[in-house]
Amino acid sequence: MKKILTLFAVVGLFAFTSCEGDEGPQGVPGPEAEVFELKNVNFAFTTQDGYNIYQKLTPLIFPSDVILIYRLNGTIDASTPVWQQIPRTLYTSQGELDYDFDFSKEDFTIYAGGNYNLSLTPEFLNNQTFRIVIVPGYFSSTGKSVNKADYSDYNAVIKKYNIDDTNVKQLN
């Protein structure tokens, strides 16, 4: 009796694992992660919002998408930039300077604020370069933290989402 049950189990295993149907139609390609750059931009000042850089998104992103922004902090050599994720607080001889941002599916704004008169440190307001990484929301739908990129590391994000950043699109 045990031999018959074992035989049925083995036959059933092969039957279920060898089933294969026709391949379904190719799905619509989903959105891909992208990188954009604002190069050598200056923060504008308004009494309402302080120092900021405002940019519309074309095309619009999906409501589930996420934007990551990195500021060019310097370079190691001509081909090795150093990117800092924002929000970021810098400690200067004048005081604390904060970079922050917000975004919607239509636009984003980068802010510079601090506990001192920021016009005293124009090197942090003028000729700034930022990389904007758009990560489609479906990348984060797995809920597995082991697959999450280290968002503070620009190069880790580029690698994780298979982004080709050799041809970054300029926004300005």
Image (spheres, rainbow, N blue to C red):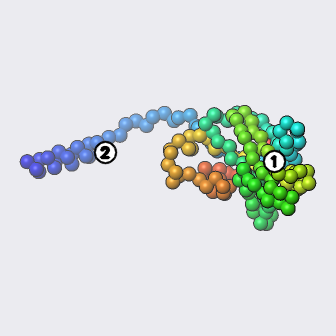
> CA gap, disc 1 to disc 2?
59 Å
Is residue 167 at least partly visible in the picture?
A: no
Residue mark closest to the camera, 1 vs 2: 1
Q: Position of residue 167 (x, y in %)?
A: 74, 50
The residue wearing badge 1 is 112
Q: Residue at x 78, y 57 (%)?
A: 90
* Observer-nearest of 54 and 50: 50
In the figure, 97 relative to 46: above or below? below
Q: Mark 1, residues whose alpha carbon is within 10 Å: few (<14), some, or many (≥20)?
A: many
State the residue lying farthest toward the bottom.
77
Taking the image as drawn, is residue 4 in sight?
A: yes
Callout 1: SS: strand
* Residue 70 numbered tag: none
Report x, y in % for residue 152.
66, 55
Query: To which residue does mark 2 refer?
Result: 17
Image position of 30 with respect to 87: above or below = above
In the foreground, 157 or 26: 157
Of residues 91 and 101, the one nearer the viewer is: 91
Q: How far across and down, in percent of the image, does residue 25 sit?
A: 48, 33
Q: Is residue 116 left or right of residue 141?
A: right
Type of the residue with mark 2: Thr
Query: In the figure, residue 83 lies in which quadrant?
Result: bottom right
Q: Is residue 146 left or right of residue 130?
A: left
Residue beneath the point at 56% across and 40% down: 138
Q: Which quadrant is the C terminus positioned in?
A: top right
So how many labels did they put on this image? 2
Residue depicted at 69% across the width and 34% down the height: 105
